[in-house]
Amino acid sequence: MGYSFPLQKIIERHINKYWITAGIKISCNHRREFYLLSGDSNDTNLKNYYKQYCRILTNVIREAKKSMYQNQIINSNSKIKTTWNIIKSVSDKMNIN
């Protein structure tokens, strides 16, 4: 019996983003709302506030990632191996984009 569309195996990739906290999720949602509001508006104050909000959120995300990586290294048995695994994971992500 032939099928028009053969079954394919789907591999789920679990990306560990432990650095995403509830506060970061809420802030990303607010950023999206500010983006939609600033796109429809000609208010320069709103656009400046959106840009400032994005800068602050970017810094918060950067610090959260840094903290996560530092905790991984501190809590590992083999610090060198953990460091290289982190470097490999980050550089693999950069090569995909």
Image (spheres, rainbow, N blue to C red):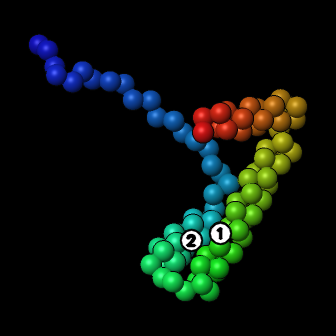
x 51%, y 35%: residue: 13
N-terminal-most mark, 2 or 1: 2
Question: Closest to the observer: 22 or 4?
Answer: 4
* Residue 90 in which image quadrant: top right
Disc 2 + disc 1, Cβ < 8 Å: yes
Q: What label does residue 80 carry, if any? A: none
| Crowding at mark 1 (Cα within 10 Å: few <14, some 14-19, many 20+) | some
Q: Is residue 57 above or below residue 68?
A: below
Q: Amino acid at mark 1?
A: Cys
* Residue 52 in which image quadrant: bottom right
Q: Position of residue 61 (x, y in %)?
A: 70, 60
Q: What label does residue 54 carry, if any? A: 1
Q: Quadrant of the N terminus?
A: top left
Q: Is residue 94 above or below residue 24?
A: above
Residue 92: tell me if it is visible: yes
Q: Position of residue 75 (x, y in %)?
A: 83, 44
Looking at the rendered structure, the number of numbered marks drawn on it comes to: 2
x 72%, y 35%: residue: 91
Q: What label does residue 31 carry, if any? A: 2
Q: Position of residue 22 (x, y in %)?
A: 60, 66
Q: Helix, strand, or loop for circle 2?
A: helix
Q: Helix, strand, or loop for circle 1?
A: helix
x 16%, y 22%: residue: 4
Q: Amino acid at mark 2?
A: Arg
Find the residue positioned furthest to the left.
1
Q: Position of residue 5 (x, y in %)?
A: 21, 24
| Crowding at mark 2 (Cα within 10 Å: few <14, some 14-19, many 20+) | some
Left or right, 9 with respect to 59, comes to left
Left or right, 91 with respect to 9, comes to right
Residue 23: tell me if it is visible: no
